[in-house]
Image (tube, rainbow, N blue to C red):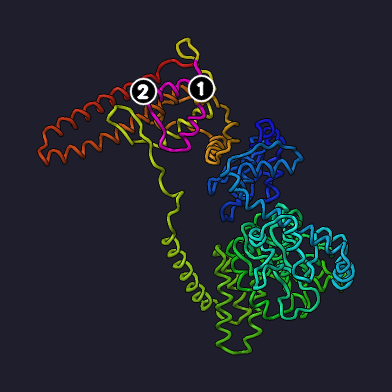
Amino acid sequence: MISRETKDKILATADIVEIISEFVNLKKRGSNYVGLCPFHNEKTPSFVVSPAKGIFKCFGCGKAGDVVSFIMEHEKLSYYEALKFLAKKYGIEIEEAPIDDEAIAKQKLREILFNLNEIALKHFKNNLWNTDWGKSVALPYLLKERKIPEYLIEKFELGFAMSDGKDFYSFARSKGYKDENLSKAGLIVKKSNGYTDRFVNRIIFPIHNITGKIIGFGGRVLGKAKDTAKYLNTPETEIFQKRDNLYGLYFAKKHIISNDKCYLVEGYTDVIGLFRAGVENVVASLGTSLTTNQIITLRRFSKNLTIVYDGDFAGIKASLRGIDLALEEGMNVRIVALPEGEDPDSITTKWTASQVVEYLKENEQDFIKYKAEFLLKETQNDPYKKSQAIHEILVSVASFDNPVTRGIYIKEISGLLNVEEEFLYDELNKILYNKYQKQAKQKQKIPITETDKKEEKKTPSLPTFISNIYYKPQEEEIIKILLKYGDKTISIDGQTFKAADIVISELKGDNITFSDPVFGKIYEEYLKGNTDIDYFINHQDSGIREVAANILFSKHKLSRIFENYNIYTYSEEDMIYQNIIVTILLFKKKILEIKRDELIKELADAENENDEEKILNLMNKITQINSILKDLTQNFDWLDKGVN
């Protein structure tokens, strides 16, 4: 465990805007910062960061919390790991004590995989710079043939995997690492003659996640590929999924934000080549078609995406299909087509940096127009092929949510394709209809997750015969009062009380508990003396942190009962006492009304069965409830008493 003193130092030092800006493109708005939420798919920014309060809140999906919560959620780390992450960033030394076995088991695998990748990285770099084969063959290949300068080799941490097939495996085993973990990291493979290195005789390109950790590797065969793949990646592991990551994003993210644009290329050397030309807002898609997760990640930094294609016709055609996803996610997609036979890496070795930048700028064009012209070329005046091309173009147009945008493109491609707008609209409407039908069916099939299920209720007690009846809106009101006004002093008839003391006294007096487990935990913590809202904002339990952040971000409004009773107040804090009484009385009133309705239904059944004993018992309970309800209603007169 991390000591409270160290934890407080981490929380005091960590700048929430600085940390979240590494993952989200934040823009200042008043005293806060806004951006696209990294936790759900959105096109309009609803993610707010408050530097003054030290919290974030998404008004779209509801995620909220402090800087630790953000790192936990975004990086899928435990509370302990998130604190270590922040401590390392700010150079804070932490003293660690043993933690329970379950927590150790949960963290162990990911830590081992990250550690193994770091060990492998150092080994591959050493092979490149300090071995005879590396210095005589691999390094000259990078410097002279690929024309990658030393500073970029060092920046991207390139390395080399030796050709004997056992080099890294033998090294890792000598350090005590187990076959099982090396295999889970994707660094070795099992063959008939035992384990061998996955990467053999290859230039190694480390793949960093957005925070700079090594999550995997790409290997480019040294020399010509014979009976082996030219490029080889780490397989899917616990910490590496190709569909979620982009090569070079760790180095490019600040440049993407400052330029408000991202260039997307295909390969590792393409990224490094554009960096060599001074174009540093560039990433690669790890050899896969563009995925929704990759698009959403990029959109947090900029909505402007320019894809740089090489001159390969088949490659361009295959890539066109994935770009519709980017359009659906609200990206502004543009295309730069390179001369036939060229790729980003090759042009940066032949042209000057200024020529590369100028070419990218002058040859950038709208994606829809490019796609229309590109597909039209291969129709060769064949009506059937032309109809197919028109359909493919309109599929992309249908990706735009805005009907005005669709209309503008219909008008432009009508002239380009020499097809009347009416026919294009007919086909577009068919595509849109099928699209919406498919989306509707998918929504109907969405399974219920554990978080969608209602939590098991605890047993409350007003009269002794009432159990398992709750009214959650008032539970939330009570927690809001405790966290926001619990330490406020209230003067009643010359006596001074704390707001929290009144709430707790009322709850204990009627043995009221909470059905919502998070509210219950907050209340229990409160009873232990933890009353500062900052304690709950920084709490280890993510549910508690989220509730506290939501309360702090929202403006707590008084209960609607004030309007129902025509009670008008000067300010929220002036009426804390009245709000406490109304909230608790309303809580009790709702519970009693729910129980009374149940008893009335039971009474009707008992009368049908002529069960006189049951009828009398039920009527007695209903009478008790009606009597209590009458008292509760009369007690609203308390609000008229003078309270300072």
Residue 501 colored in magenta in the image: yes
Q: Is residue 420 left or right of residue 116?
A: left
- In the rendering, at what x and y percent does residue 460 appear? 36, 31
Q: Which mark is residue 636?
A: 2
Q: Is residue 294 visible?
A: no
Which residue reaches farthest left? 610
557 shown above or below 183: above
Does the segment drawn in magenta span residue 520?
A: yes
Q: Where is 57 relative to 392, above or below? A: above
Task: Quote the CA–CA distance across marks 1 and 2.
Answer: 17 Å
Vertical relation: 112 (above or below) 335 = above
Q: Which mark is residue 328?
A: none
- Residue 507 location (% of width, % of height): 41, 25
The answer to which of 21 and 366 lies nearer the viewer is: 21
Q: Residues within 10 Å of mark 2 (few under 14, many from 20)?
A: some
Q: Of residues 5 and 54, which is closer to you in this image?
A: 5
Q: Amino acid at mark 2?
A: Phe
Query: What is the three-letter code of the residue carrying label 1?
Result: Asp
Does 598 sit above or below residue 413? above
Residue annotated with mark 1 = 574
Q: Residue furthest top?
A: 494
Residue 544 on image: x %, y % = 53, 37
- SS class of the residue under badge 1? helix
**Region in magenta:** 497-526
> Most prominent secondary structure in the magenta stretch?
helix
Dot 1 or dot 2: first in sequence order is 1
| Mark 1 surroundings within 10 Å by alpha-carbon count, few (fewer than 14), some (14 through 19), many (20 or more) | few
